[in-house]
Image (spheres, rainbow, N blue to C red):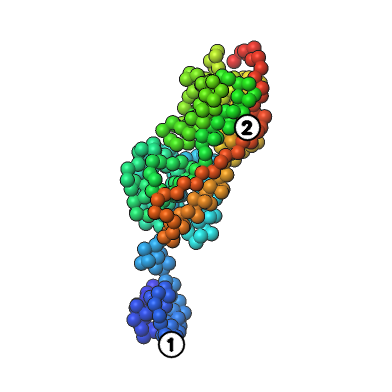
Amino acid sequence: MTTIRDVARTAGVSIATVSAVINDSAFVSADLRVRVLNAISELRYAPSRVARNLKRGRTELIALAVADLANPFYARIVWAAEAAAAAWGYALVVFNSDENPDTEKRVLERIRNLRCDGAVVVPVGAADHYGAGALHDGAPVVLLGRSVEDGSIDTVTIDNLSAGSQATNYLLDLGHTRIGSVTGPLHISTGRGRYDGMVEAMKARGLAPDPAHVRSGEFREDVAYSVARDLLSRPDRPSALYVANGLMALGVMRAVVDLGLRCPDDISIASTDNIAGIGGLKPQLTRTEHPVLDMTNEALRMLVERLKGKGPPSGRSIVFRPALVVGDSCAPLRQRSPARRK
């Protein structure tokens, strides 16, 4: 295997001169440059890009750690991040934390061991779970979708309060006052923010959710299915549900069908999130959507800016506003249909 020493010997120059020609890192006279390039061509020497980058303190790798690869929402983020990273000249390495803080800790360690130039992370722990440097020990990090209590980290999120309040206000405008919720984990910023948005919307009209009508679906389809079956089997079930993400909405809609109920005749459902296929549900789901591609591109742009040594010393926060998309899954409050046999 041809080495840089072979090139130097053939060209009659030092290894440092060959390195300077390859990396364009120092002045080399035209005569010496031609000799080095001829030797490279003659020996068919292919310098290791990885080795060159490591010498420069770079790997040209960007890590992306998502919360749950089983969630189609994160598949869209991976697709968008890979395209954006390539456009900036980087390769993307994808990790799955599986909504588990212990797994996330191991993922962050692997990112450090791979010497990735930077990382985009969807954090899965509680906001106060991360100590100083836990997320950004050396390499720059941008948080995507969720936030933590660290003002030094750049963050790209949506307005979760607005997401919850928009969906809930739509249900309230239809006359629903007995509104339940399948929430995400309330220790995570998205779960807490969307539920707080729901509570604030109801409070503004002198209402409050019945604690018996609020269940955590843990941002999982199977868990949401289970809690929705239990909640909707109650004799005092709510007339409407706000579901905190799209994956859980799929589970809730399955529960509605399996219980022999009809949406929106028996239960109105509004959600937050846009995942593949959710727009094709029958009835079409009313939901607050956030611009996944724009958010992902912005996170990669901010990260590359940090890699270039730009940006303020403190962390920046970019907040996108969700938009309400009205479907057919909500209807004005009316007298409940007689219970059917299950």
Give the residue pinned by disc 1: 31
Type of amino acid at the residue the image marks with label 2: Thr
Residue 170 lies left or right of residue 299; in this view the side is right
Can residue 96 be seen in this snapshot?
A: yes
Q: Earlier in the sequence, mark 1 or mark 2?
A: 1
For numbered disc 2, what is the local secondary structure? strand
Residue in front for this viewpoint, 111 or 325: 325
Can residue 262 be seen in this snapshot?
A: no
Please, which residue is most extreme toward the bottom here? 31
Dot 1 alpha-carbon crowd within 10 angstroms: few under 14, some 14 to 19, many 20 or more: few
* Quadrant occupied by the C terminus: top right
Q: Is residue 50 above or below residue 289?
A: below
Mark 1 in CB contact with mark 2 (< 8 angstroms) = no
* Res. 149 image quadrant: top left
Residue 7 lies left or right of residue 261; in this view the side is left
User: Which residue appears at 40% of the width and 51% of the height?
Assistant: 314
User: Which residue appears at 38% of the width and 44% of the height?
Assistant: 150
For numbered disc 1, what is the local secondary structure? helix
Residue 123: % across, % down: 42, 42
Give the residue pinned by disc 2: 286
Residue in front for this viewpoint, 140 or 72: 140
Residue 194: % across, % down: 50, 32
Type of amino acid at the residue the image marks with label 1: Asp
* Quadrant occupied by the N terminus: bottom left
Dot 2 alpha-carbon crowd within 10 angstroms: few under 14, some 14 to 19, many 20 or more: many
Residue 292: % across, % down: 55, 45
